[in-house]
Image (spheres, rainbow, N blue to C red):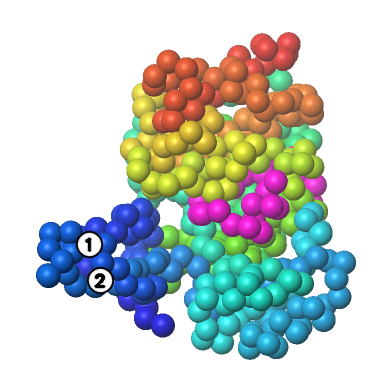
Amino acid sequence: MHFILFRHLLPLLALPLLAACSFTPAEYKVIGKTTNNTTCQVSPHLCIETHVFQRVDYEKDEMLITYDSDKPAEVADAVLKKYRLRAKRSDDLGAIKTTMITAATNGQDPQDLMKSIKKNETEVDAATSNFYATAAGAPLGVVGSMYPLSLTGIGAARQHTSGNGVVIGMIDTPVDIDHESLHSAIERIDLIPAGDEANRLHGTEIAGVMISRNPRIGIAPDARLVAISAFSTNPQNPQERRSNSGLVAKALQIAMDRGVNVLNLSFAGKPDPVVDRLVEAAMQRGITVVASAGNGGPHAPAAYPAAIPGVIAVTAVDKGEQVFNNANRGDYIDLAAPGVGILTTAPRGSFHVSSGTSLATAHVSGAIALLKSMNAAFNPTTLNQTAIDLGKPGYDPEYGYGLINLERSMAMTGR
């Protein structure tokens, strides 16, 4: 198996797969050879076979084995032994009646193993443990102009409620629960160590937007927050916070078990057979799922879980209501919310200004918490009907239905 770390070679390659990547630095493996290149098209006499690369966007020594929870554990034990796998953890995903084993591959390539198991085994399924990354840009410091919360009608809603009685769930990095602007109604469940200040940054930012008691920051300060820590610093890129599908799946089950009403997923990745099923199960239980549209830029592929039908996919706009330059575009985007130059909380009792679709997603989650606090039966699709149209008239792939507006939503529901 050939693994290659690309830095200077990327500009020389014209493979669409490479161009679509958003993680840096990126790692690829050789999966074959091809004659479909410029040299071969010019002259068959000069044709030279070139390698075909595939991005390694999954844990290299880990994979997921899943099976129906009604089946005995022996069905998985036999597969683990046959393919020389070592069970690291077993999780009961009750929402989809599945047992998930996170297994070490002992140096074998997880994707090759997955193909072999899918082809030859009938009692279990196999998947790579795919990467997800949080969707926020770098902090901008404590400078810049701030949003008035009235831009999306938050002030009008806050005359009636501060989110009382609603439970928001978030899957992110650890939150600095000692921040004086946050409050004691946070349940932090750590699936990974809390780590240093940098490791707690993104989760603290997102929690602040949703529930900070600072009146310039928090949207639903009286909502209860279940903060599940599943993301941590990527050793390959210290500026990135990363998780994998095994941890995210476990976190999703915990969120459902805790009875959350709104689930904030300020991260992005690719489709995943286990995670996608759990997100769908959460929605079937009546949980409103809000996810980041992604920060891959205008030509990035659709981000998941935001692109799952029924999930509210959120993009970011600045105070001039212009779409965030780095935001994904696509027909899966539903709504826009403030996400550029956002004042929020940071570790060690500090504050700063940050940008990204993650912040916009938290804004929408907080807004939905306010609306559900006033009316538990509130239908979030009302937000699409009452959004302020931006960009081209009607729905478009940059802004979705437009900028959320709680005043219009309350008027439509008779509040």
Are the two marked residues, 2 and 1, in contact with CB atoms closer than 8 angstroms?
Answer: yes
Quadrant of the drawing holding the N terminus: bottom left
Please say whether residue 370 is visible from this viewpoint.
yes
Estimate the x, y position of residue 56 in percent, counting from the top left: 43, 69
Label 2 sits on residue? 50
Residue in the image at 36% along x and 53% along y: 20
Note whether 338 is above or below 300 in the view shown.
above
Left or right of residue 176: residue 336: left
Residue matched to label 1: 37
- How far separated are the C-alphas under marks 2 and 1? 8 Å
Residue 63's place in the image compared with 309, above or below, is: below
Where is the C terminus found, in terms of image quarters?
top right
Give the crowd class for mark 2: few <14, some 14-19, many >=20 residues within 10 Å.
some
Q: Residue 162 lies in what quarter of the image?
A: top right
Residue sitting at x 77%, y 38% = 286
For mark 1, does the 10 Å Cα neighbourhood hold few (<14), some (14 to 19), or many (20 or more) residues? some
Answer above or below: position of 402 versus 205: above
- Callout 1 amino acid: Asn
From where the camera sits, is residue 345 visible? no
The x and y percentages for residue 144 are 34, 35
- Name the spot of residue 134 as percent of width and height, x first: 49, 53
Residue drawn at point x = 65 percent, y = 25 percent:
381
Left or right: 170, with 326 as reference point: right
Residue lying at 36% horizontally and 27% vertically, measured from the top left:
322
> N-terminal of the two: label 2 or label 1?
1
Q: Secondary structure at mark 1?
A: loop
Whether residue 304 appears in magenta in the rendering, the answer is no
Please state the extent of the stretch shown in magenta in the rendering.
258-280
Element at label 2: strand
Depth order, front residue of 182/248: 248
Residue 263 in the magenta stretch? The answer is yes
